[in-house]
Image (cartoon, grey):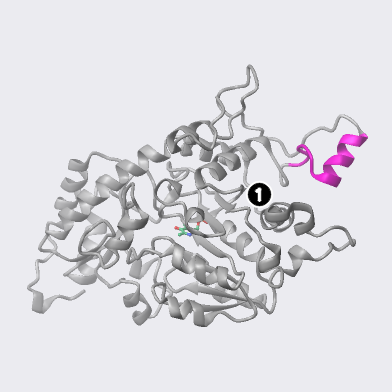
Amino acid sequence: MAAGADTGFSTRQVHAGAATAQASPRATPIYLTAGFTFSDLDESAAHFGEGTGFGYSRTGNPTVHAVEERLASLEGGDQAVLVSSGQAAVTVALLALAGAGDHVVVSEHIYEGTRGLLLDNLARLGVETTFVDTDDLDAWRAAITPRTRALFAETLSNARNDVLDVAAVAVIGAEHGIPLVVDSTFTTPYLLRPIEHGAAVVVHSASKFLAGQGAVLGGVIVDDGRFDAAASGHRFAHLVQTDRLGGASYAEKYGARARGQYIRESVAPRFGPSPSPLNAFLIGQGIETLSLRVERQSQNALAVARWLEQRPEVERVDYIGLDSHPHHGLGERYLTRGFGSVFTVTLRGGLEAARHVVQSVEVITHMTHLGDVRSLVLHPQSTSHAARTVAERERAGVFPGTIRLSVGIEDIDDLLADLEQALLGVPVLERETVVL
Ligand SMILES: *Cc1c(COP(=O)(O)O)cnc(C)c1O
């Protein structure tokens, strides 16, 4: 069966990208090979000239390609490029847009690896970053300069679970011919498809929900295929100028697909974070159950968040699915199938209460990672957010007593029982004596 764009999400997650020729293997084979044979000189010349067929796994591999097709379909994008990690996906996306002397505007609430990439690595390469308050549309607008090449944000922030108003920020970028790049790791294409709301490029850490089993790393960049040379060409000379040998530009060769093709042909294979075909296979297997897992994880997370909100040991629960979250209304607008499963809980007993809980859980695993089928817990202040100042941490909703949960697919009664036993021994403080 060919899964056309008119079929539903769950149908496409198992069929898109799969071979349809007669007697093809139903599971995508793992093409674990560095390269592919050429049948004659013309075929090798065509591969190097026009990029037809498969030649070498860094530039293309059938297993990788099948997963790319599936992800492009699920995101509603034009094409996807699979890479070796989420960090590689963010790096490749930004290097495809910005170079020395350029500038990007970025939400202040982003993954620490991306923040370090911008502050240390891209800064050293001459790409400057302005961080803005995600909610402040005037700040996004005011930060744009003639050198700005991208707006960047995450759909759901870690730790405070703030929701990005994708459409509003995308419009600001579009007014200036600047693409919005969205890291949608926390929401997955099942909960939110940023391209439908105007984002130009979507990236994911496929290590998280997409793979789902916590066994492999991977990342993906999805391009919308809507590059407009007339509106954006002045910001992206590398897409509209003749190539190094005086040949046609990417825009001349590929039109609206120029940016996606540049990512695929130039940036990803040259910087080289190629995915292993074996990892690509496992990510493809994971995606086949994405909707089922995310639905169950969202249901479990809502039940856990509601239960925790009632506990006397708990000061606050920052979960977008709760009415008490300041972005709940925005969340309902963007997340119609569930609110995700990664959020924070702040305990009244401060650091010692958090230490007690992360060291007492038995069903829930104490580790860094998220989007796994298993429930996980981590203490952000001493780990993911350790490189930030106290003021920066508090703005992100991270206090000494904050723990982050990534809720899995276990039976809800077992999760609640585990949290209940882990909370035993945590002091129940009166409001006045709360030490966050
Ligand atoms: C994990 C993560 C990344 C980095 O992905 P890796 O696969 O670990 O390299 C980037 N962004 C977000 C939001 C993440 O959670």
Left or right of 96: which side holds 325?
Answer: left
Tell me where residue 30 sits by quadrant: top right
Specify whether residue 117 is in view. no
How many C-alpha atoms fall within 10 Å of the one at disc 1: few (<14), some, or many (≥20)? Answer: many
Residue 264: percent from the left, percent from the top? 69, 52
Q: Which residue is mark 1?
A: 274
Residue sitting farthest toward the left: 430
Q: Residue visible at 36% across and 40% down?
A: 293
Q: Is residue 14 magenta?
A: no
Q: Residue visible at 64% across and 80% down?
A: 146
Amino acid type at image mark 1 = Ser
Q: Nearer the viewer, residue 374 or 248?
A: 248
Q: Residue visible at 56% across and 51% down?
A: 220
Residue 40: percent from the left, percent from the top? 90, 31
Residue 428: percent from the left, percent from the top? 9, 66
Q: Is residue 44 magenta?
A: yes
Left or right of 213: which side holds 397?
Answer: left
Residue 410: percent from the left, percent from the top? 27, 40
Q: Is residue 271 above or below residue 363?
A: below
Residue sitting farthest toward the top: 23
Specify whether residue 133 is in view. yes
Q: Nearer the viewer, residue 126 or 353?
A: 126
Q: Which residues are magenta?
A: 41-56
Quarter of the picture holding the N terminus? top right
Tell me where residue 164 sits by quadrant: bottom left
Left or right of 248: which side holds 198?
Answer: left
Quarter of the picture holding the C terminus? bottom left
- Majority secondary structure of magenta residues: helix
Q: Residue visible at 27% across and 72% down?
A: 400
Q: Classify mark 1: helix, strand or loop.
A: loop
